[in-house]
Amino acid sequence: MTITVHTPAAGRHRRAGFVDLGHARDDFRADVLAGLARAEKQLSAKYFYDARGSKLFDRITELPEYYPTRTELGILRDHADDIAELAGPQTTVVEFGAGSSIKIRLLLDAVDAQTFVPIDISGEHLREAADGIAVDYPGTDVVAVCADFTRSIELPDDVPADNRLGFFPGSTIGNFTPAEAAKFLRQCAALLGPGSGLVIGVDLKKDVQVLHDAYNDAAGVTAAFNLNLLARINRELHGNFDLRAFRHKAFYNEAEGRIEMHIESLRDQTVHVAGAQVPFRKGETIHTEYSCKYTVAEFQALAAEAGYEPLAAWTDPDTLFSLHYLRAAA
């Protein structure tokens, strides 16, 4: 673990700390090699978000086909005061994933946040996001934690334990299967503590064409985002993937209620990664992401199974997306 505390100029802000739990590098290598050795190859979606992947995802959120970000922002703007009322005074806001800072700023503008703790596996992106918040919110302590939030972790001892509010926007909960999502929610409750709140974005079931277009945009940004995972392996693990020999593939599995994202090999080939040989058949795929979709009632039932009480759920007028306020058992 490494801890860095930036001391600002007088009066600028109270504290900006960075804590590195050391999950990223070794886990990436081990997980990639294990995933590519499986009979049905897979890579974890959490590894999309290196510096370039994070920038590509920011571009995705601005695409006309990609409705989740702008829709969730609208819901958050409309109901930020409702969230603040449910959260109460002097909150410690814990954000799972340091994405675009627009959403967290809407939340921080509304709630009485004494401390803000962003958690993300991408250290460079995390530092940039945390430093920006620290400068713009001088009354809030910022403690950034570089870690894999899908694992069981502990927050630094100096992070207040009372009245914690988790924030997990976007549709990232959909990257888990329902069983995995329930496990993750239980981990959130353990990290945040009894009686804590959790604000979470959940994508809803809808017209299949709308879903298809969101993951197969005309500009090809989602394809570049998906294939960047192979480029990252090349950069960091001495891989020799020829990106021209693979293509992005995404489709809606209606029976399972989820988008499935894959990278498909366009020919028979052998790739070298971290000293290992990885054979591919033409048409063979690497599964890179699930994006499970729910109805409001389905997700509330899942949250209840994980030990949360659903207190509120808000949607947009077209019922494309939902934002939930959950409370952990006391």
Image (cartoon, helix red, strand yellow):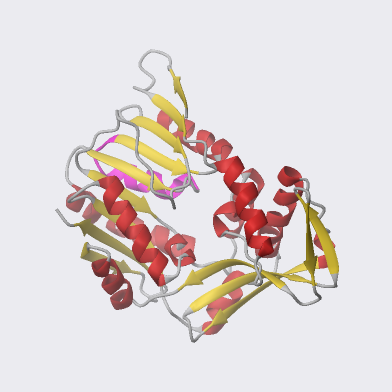
User: Which of these two is toward me, 201 or 233?
Assistant: 233
User: Which of these two is toward me, 260 or 76?
Assistant: 260
Q: Residue drawn 37% across and 58% down?
A: 184
Q: Is residue 51 above or below residue 183?
A: above
Q: Is residue 46 left or right of residue 156?
A: right
Q: Residue drawn 57% across and 59% down?
A: 44
Residue ranking furthest to the bottom: 255
What span is colored magenta in the figure? 100-114
Q: Is residue 306 left or right of residue 44?
A: left
Q: Is residue 112 left or right of residue 15?
A: left
Q: Is residue 103 magenta?
A: yes
Q: Is residue 260 left or right of residue 301?
A: right
Q: Position of residue 230 (x, y in %)?
A: 72, 56
Q: Is residue 168 above or below residue 216?
A: above
User: Which of these two is toward me, 110 or 325?
Assistant: 325
Inspect this view and state whether residue 80 appears.
Answer: no
The kind of secondary structure the magenta stretch mainly shows is helix
Inspect this view and state whether residue 50 appears.
Answer: yes
Residue ranking furthest to the left: 330
Q: Position of residue 202 (x, y in %)?
A: 39, 66
Q: How many marks?
A: 0
Q: Position of residue 58 (x, y in %)?
A: 58, 52
Residue ranking furthest to the top: 10
User: Which of these two is toward me, 173 or 295?
Assistant: 173
Q: Residue drawn 43% across and 14% down?
A: 9
Q: Position of residue 329 (x, y in %)?
A: 17, 57
Q: Is residue 315 above or below residue 31?
A: below
Q: Is residue 219 magenta?
A: no
